[in-house]
Structure formats: structure tokens, C-alpha cells
Amino acid sequence: MAPSRDIARLIEIMAALRDREHGCPWDVEQDFDSIAPYTIEEAYEVADAIAERDMPALKDELGDLLLQVVYHAQMASEAGAFAFPDVVEAVTTKMIRRHPHVFGDEDAKAAGQAKGVWERIKSEEKRERAAATPSVAPGVLDDISASLPSLVRAQKLQEKAATVGFDWNDPKAVIAKIREEIAEIEAELDAGDTGRVAGEVGDLLFVVVNLARHLKVDADHALRLTNTKVVKRFRAIESALASEGRTPSEASLAEMEALWQAAKAGD
């Protein structure tokens, strides 16, 4: 089977990999739960390629992410739930519906404003889904997926709550809340109640994400940048010690801190 620019070839390849008699044993035994972590990982690798402005890598990573979509669609097709064309139809229907100011008639284009249209139509879709399952009372935060990475989900929960007025109106108020949460952690440590510390640390992280949101900073992206910076500086520490024939485990904390500061100054 030859490579192709046609999405149909990728769908054929995935079907062949999943063939019970002639496919790949590993691919055949996978299910939605086992593949989901790979889907998340591929999305992050796309984000990494974008952060590095590495276009060849971005091309490859987008292909890997597309493969994940095809993989899930193939498994759904096998289960009789839906197939890849249904995925395409669903997203094109959604995009057209959510952009009446682009795809509507001339009156809609004249009257439509991009700002607010997306969220309004999403709310309408949510009410329609709720009407289809009347036994389930819809909640403001219900459409924020629990499977999102924790920092991302925290920011999305806060953004959604803010749409109904549940929010601080001043970043300094959030900073005050951060100080309050730190004090609560200190109180638990003083009391020796380590069992409650995890919950208090979670509260602190949640409020720090809120501060990032108020400052128009994407918390997950900011932490990614810091993680990259930490790796770079620690490599500088390792390199400096290696030039002396030593490793970090053979150096004192004071020595490593001095090397860290030197690396920081060189950023």
C-alpha cells in the first residue's frame, strides 16, 4: 500500500491495521481507553512543535494527531456507532452553525457579530442536548471535560464560571486569596495535619491559575515555558559539573544553586 495525500488512504491503512485476521496484533487489541492517552500525548507534541516553531515537526505531529482521530473513528465504526465521514459531517455542521456571520444569508452576515456568537450558539446546542436527556439537569460547568489536563481544566472552569458573574474583578484580590491559601497550608503544617495539605495545595494551584487568567496568561503554556527553562538551566549545571569530572549528586546544594544563578543570568 503506497502513501497518499488522500485522507481515504489513511482510513484504509487504519482499517487494515485493525483487521482481525491480517492486521497488526497490537492495533487490533486496542480500545478507546487504551488509545486516549496517546491522543492527549499527540496533542501536546503538536503544541511543542508550535512552541519551537519547527514546521517539519509540526507537519509530522499534525499527521500523528490526525491518525488518532482516524483510529477512534475506526473503532467507533467497528462498534456500529459512527464512521470517519460522520465525524467530518458533525464538525462541518458545527462550524457552519456557529458562524452565521460568515456562512449565513446576507441579513445574517450584516447583523452578525463574531464576538459572542460562538458562545451563544454553543449554549443553544447545550440546551438542545439537555432537552434530549431531560432527566439530567444541565449545569454551567457541565461541558468542561473532566479528562482535560488539570491546569487547562481549572482555567476553563474559571472562565465558564466568570460568564455568570462568579469571578473576582481585580487581580489584586486574587493575589490576596493566594496569600490566604498559603497561610492555610502553613497552618496545616503547624498543626501537623499532613492529610489536609494536599487539598490546600490544590486550592493554591487553582487560585494561581485564576491569577494567570486575570493577567491574560495561559497557565498551562506558562508552566510549559518554565519547565523548558528549568531543563535548560539544569543542563547547564550538569555541563559545568561535568567539566570538573563531577555529577550533580557529587555537588553540594550551595554549589548547584550558584551554578543555577549563573545559568539564570545567562538566559
Image (cartoon, rainbow, N blue to C red):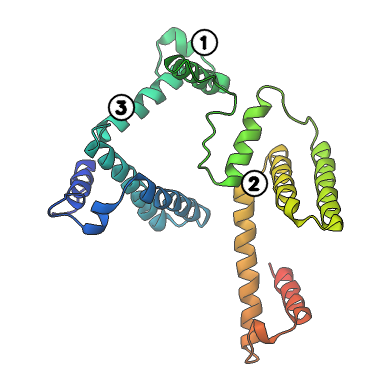
Q: Identify whether 45 is placed above or below 133.
A: below
Q: Quadrant of residue 128?
A: top left
Q: Where's residue 6, x and y in %?
A: 21, 43
Q: How crowded is mark 3: few (under 14 residues within 10 Å), some or many (20 or more)?
A: few
Residue 37's label in the rendered image is none
Q: Report the quarter where the C terminus lies.
A: bottom right
Q: Determine the residue positioned at 35% across, 44% down.
A: 32
**Which residue lies under the disc numbered 2?**
219
How far apart marks 3 and 2 lie (CA) works out to: 33 Å
Q: Identify whether 57 is placed above or below 124.
A: below
**Which residue lies under the disc numbered 3?**
89
Residue at disc 1, secondary structure? helix
Q: Determine the residue positioned at 62% across, 34% down.
A: 157
Q: How crowded is mark 1: few (under 14 residues within 10 Å), some or many (20 or more)?
A: few
Of 7 and 156, the residue lying toward us? 156
Q: Identify whether 42 is placed above or below 146.
A: below
Q: Determine the residue positioned at 66% across, 34% down.
A: 158
Of 213 and 152, the residue lying toward us? 152
**Which residue lies under the disc numbered 1?**
111
User: What amino acid does circle 3 point to?
Assistant: Glu
Residue at disc 2, secondary structure? helix
How far apart marks 3 and 1 lie (CA) works out to: 27 Å
Instruction: Identify the mark nearer the N-term, 1 or 2.
Output: 1
How far apart marks 1 and 2 lie (CA) works out to: 35 Å
Numbered disc total? 3
User: What amino acid does circle 1 point to?
Assistant: Ala
User: What amino acid does circle 2 point to?
Assistant: Ala
Asked if residue 246 lies left or right of residue 34, the reply is right
Q: Quadrant of residue 11?
A: top left
